[in-house]
Image: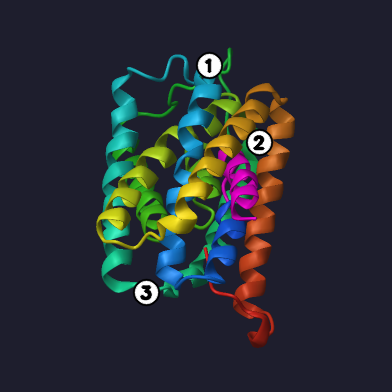
Amino acid sequence: MFFVASIAAGAINTLAGGGGLITFPLLMLVVAPVTADATSAVALLSAYPTALWRTRGQLTGVLGHRWLWLLLIPSLLGGLLGALLLSRTGDRNFVEFVPWLVVLATFIILLRPILVRRREGDSSRPDFTAAWWPVVMAIIFVVALYGGYFGAGIGILMIGALSFISPGDIRHVVALKNLLTGCLRGVAVIVLVLEGNVDWKYGAPMTLGGLVGGYLGGLVSHRANRVVVRWIVTGIGFGVAAYYFWKLYGPAVMRVGGE
């Protein structure tokens, strides 16, 4: 059951994020919250390498450029600090901000064709002046900090942030999201593993499932029409937001803590 769940979650994470909504509640049935969070993160991390491999063509013209480091460095730092914060405090109050952040990011993705001026040829090169880079780096850092600390809907938030950075095809944005999110979650997982927060009895088979799911999700993302990908992403985003609105404001007896 955990293996199959991680396949579905890995595929969902590759397209947009929110796969933790499947794995975390299941793990909450058998382990403590922080352990479930860490084990879920480890299980779904394996989806990113296979997703990157399947979508590598969408990153053509991105890898090797210096501006990519201006996105990658704050992603790594944010993921590291977020994981340290989670490991040291275990505080879950940040969940109150999750649905609002995810709704905002999802609306950005939904309105992306109107808000973002696409370049001819669907270029993924940033389309703004150098003066905006500190603001962009700060936004990516905050998103990564959240991703290392909590992780719910991190893919949706990262796509929303990247929508104004990469003016091209939504598939370029999804591929870039997989790269940055995989890196920041990788740093976070290293911290959580070193802190002994992972239950490998469940984490090992779920990691294999996440690997399979990442490949399948990358296959869909690579071949799907850009409009279809955007609607899949927005559908997942609104689904993630609805889950957390229900979790926060629904009947207290029915609430389940989780990522």
Where does residue 175 sit, x and y in percent of width and height? 52, 29
Residue beneath the point at 54% across and 74% down:
257
User: Would residue 170 be seen by someone viewing this image from the given angle?
Assistant: yes
Q: Nearer the viewer, residue 196 or 166?
A: 196
The numbered disc on residue 114 is 2
**Circle 1 is placed at which residue position?**
57
Local secondary structure at mark 1: helix
Q: Amino acid at mark 3?
A: Asp
Q: Is residue 85 left or right of residue 160?
A: left
Looking at the image, do the residues carrying marks 1 and 3 touch, with CB atoms under 8 Å apart? no
**Circle 3 is placed at which residue position?**
91
Q: Quadrant of residue 87?
A: bottom left
Q: Amino acid at mark 1?
A: Gly
Segment colored magenta: 1-18
Q: Amino acid at mark 2?
A: Ile
Residue 175 sits above or below residue 157 on the image: above
Q: Main secondary structure of the magenta part?
A: helix
Q: Please, which residue is most extreme toward the bottom here?
A: 253
Residue 171 sits above or below residue 101 on the image: above
Local secondary structure at mark 2: helix
Q: Residues within 10 Å of mark 3 (few under 14, many from 20)?
A: few
Residue 102 sits above or below residue 9 on the image: below
Residue beneath the point at 45% across and 71% down:
33
The answer for how far apart the CA atoms under marks 2 and 3 are is: 38 Å
